[in-house]
Amino acid sequence: MSFAVQSQNFVQNLFGASSPAPATASTAAATTANPYSNDNVQIAGTNPESAGFFKKMGNGIGEMFSDLSYSMGMGETYRLVEREFQQADNSRDGLLNHGEFTVATLNPFEFQAVDSNYDGRVDKKEYTRYRKDRLEAAFEQKDVNRDSHLNIAEIGSIGRVYLANRDPRLDSNMDGLVNKREYVRAQLTLGISIRDLIGF
């Protein structure tokens, strides 16, 4: 009685697809064209399409600690949201009016929903509660295969270039996938950098 080995896909599904080892030095230097777009983006190696079990589990634990530190007013994400708030607060009164809120979020339509006490201003507590939730909702909307990571097909046209080249500003662990924390941090950092550039 013999058992046929079906494929190595079980290991890839468990740990997440990864780049195969290059056969020679010449193939290691070669890049392949991005199969998900027509804009000839070059991919440094092969990008995985979904996260495996251990990657999902590790990401879930990381998110739990990140959410806990954020709720206590600590952690990198909280500092970035706080910096974004301070950058948008031109009047330096610790509150955002409608115009300042729009500059920070590029979304003038949610101001009244964020202003939970209806005083016509958004304070730091209201803003920090809103901003992280909104960015995480955008991530969930993009995550089509529901593996808690964005692959190169899901990330969108702007992020695709960064992810294809494993740019650490988006893909900090350079695994070819973007988890929720990486996505939120990249969105906040990009907004802060743009406002720094134009003098806010």
Image: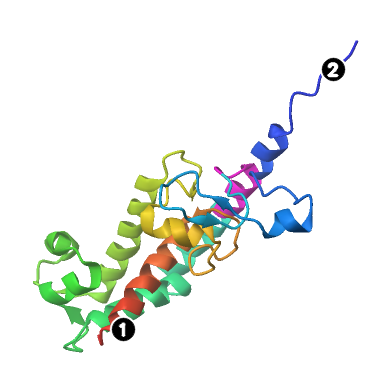
Q: Quadrant of residue 70?
A: bottom left
Point out the image quarter for the N terminus: top right
Q: Position of residue 18 (x, y in %)?
A: 66, 48
Residue 24 part of the magenta-drawn span = no
Q: Counting other residues with Cα less than 10 Å from the Cα at mark 1, is it few (<14), some (14-19), or many (20 or more)?
A: few
Q: Which residue is mark 2?
A: 3
**What residue would you read off at disc 1?**
197
Q: Which residues are magenta?
A: 49-59
Q: Is residue 137 above or below residue 132?
A: above
**Nearer to the camera, 122 or 5:** 5
Callout 2: 10 Å neighbours few (<14), some, many (20+)?
few
**What secondary structure characterizes most of the magenta part?**
helix
- Left or right placement of residue 79 versus residue 35 in this view: left
Tell which tag, 1 or 2, sits nearer the viewer. 1
Do the residues under discs 1 and 2 have CB atoms within 8 angstroms? no
Residue, x 45% and y 45% (percent of image)? 153
First in sequence, mark 1 or 2: give its number.
2
Q: At 47% from the left edge and 55% from the top edge, which residue is drawn?
A: 41
Number of numbered discs overlaid on the protein picture: 2
Which residue type carries mark 1? Answer: Leu
Near-viewer residue (174 or 111): 174
Counting from the top left corner in percent of width and height, residue 38 is at 41, 47
How far is the residue under mark 1 from the one under mark 2? Answer: 62 Å
